Image: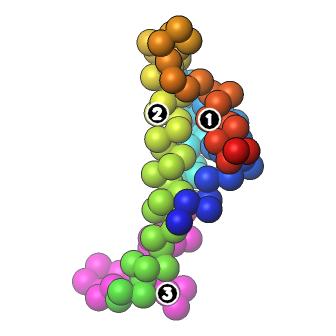
């Protein structure tokens, strides 16, 4: 089910890891904008979704993987930003960024 949690995806999502950086948050916003324009605002036939359109079950199912990927990326980025804000106490922490990057190497 979580076959998108690859080392490559995690590295890509954490290439700019800090929500404290304007450059990172701008990159994240642009990334989200592209996904919205290419998927959320187009139906399964690649036609523009307009106000009042009926969205089919196929529309939702075909975008579910994208939603899962975006949530995973957001979760990793949030964790990384919180580590920047509060610091990572490695004496009590159960994971670090390097451990997250090794997630799929087991």
Residue 32 is inside the magenta segment? no
- How far across and down, in percent of the image, does residue 17 sit? 61, 31
Give the mark nearest the N terminus, 3 or 1.
3
Can residue 105 be seen by looking at this rendering? yes
Q: Secondary structure at mark 2?
A: helix
Pointer 3: what residue?
44
Inter-mark Cα distance, 3 to 1: 34 Å
Pointer 1: what residue?
100
Residue sticking out furthest to the left: 52
Q: Are marks 2 and 3 in contact (CB under 8 Å)?
A: no
Q: Nearer the viewer, mark 3 or mark 1?
A: 1
Q: Tell me how the rendering is colored.
A: rainbow
Residue 52 is inside the magenta segment? yes
Q: Secondary structure at mark 1?
A: helix
Q: Main secondary structure of the magenta part?
A: loop
- How far across and down, in percent of the image, does residue 91 sit? 53, 8
In the picture, the quarter occupied by the C terminus is: top right
- How far across and down, in percent of the image, does residue 102 sit? 70, 38
Pointer 2: what residue?
78
Q: Residue at x 68, y 37 (%)?
A: 101
Give the mark nearest the N terminus, 1 or 2.
2
Number of other residues with Cα within 10 Å of mark 3, as a class: few under 14, some 14 to 19, many 20 or more: some
Residues shaded magenta:
35-55
Q: Are marks 1 and 2 in contact (CB under 8 Å)?
A: no
Q: Residue at x 68, y 52 (%)?
A: 6
Q: Residue at x 43, y 79 (%)?
A: 61
Can residue 12 be seen by looking at this rendering? no
Mark linked to residue 54:
none
């Amino acid at each position: 089910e979580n076959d998108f949690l690859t080392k490559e995806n995690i590295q890509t999502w954490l290439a700019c890891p800090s929500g404290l950086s304007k450059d990172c948050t701008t990159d994240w916003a642009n990334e989200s904008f592209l996904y919205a324009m290419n998927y959320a605002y187009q139906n399964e036939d690649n036609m523009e979704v307009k106000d009042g359109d009926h969205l089919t079950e196929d529309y939702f199912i075909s975008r579910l993987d994208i939603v899962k990927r975006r949530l995973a990326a957001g979760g990793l980025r949030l964790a990384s930003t919180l580590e920047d804000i509060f610091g990572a106490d490695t004496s009590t922490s159960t994971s670090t960024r390097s451990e997250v990057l090794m997630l799929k190497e087991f």
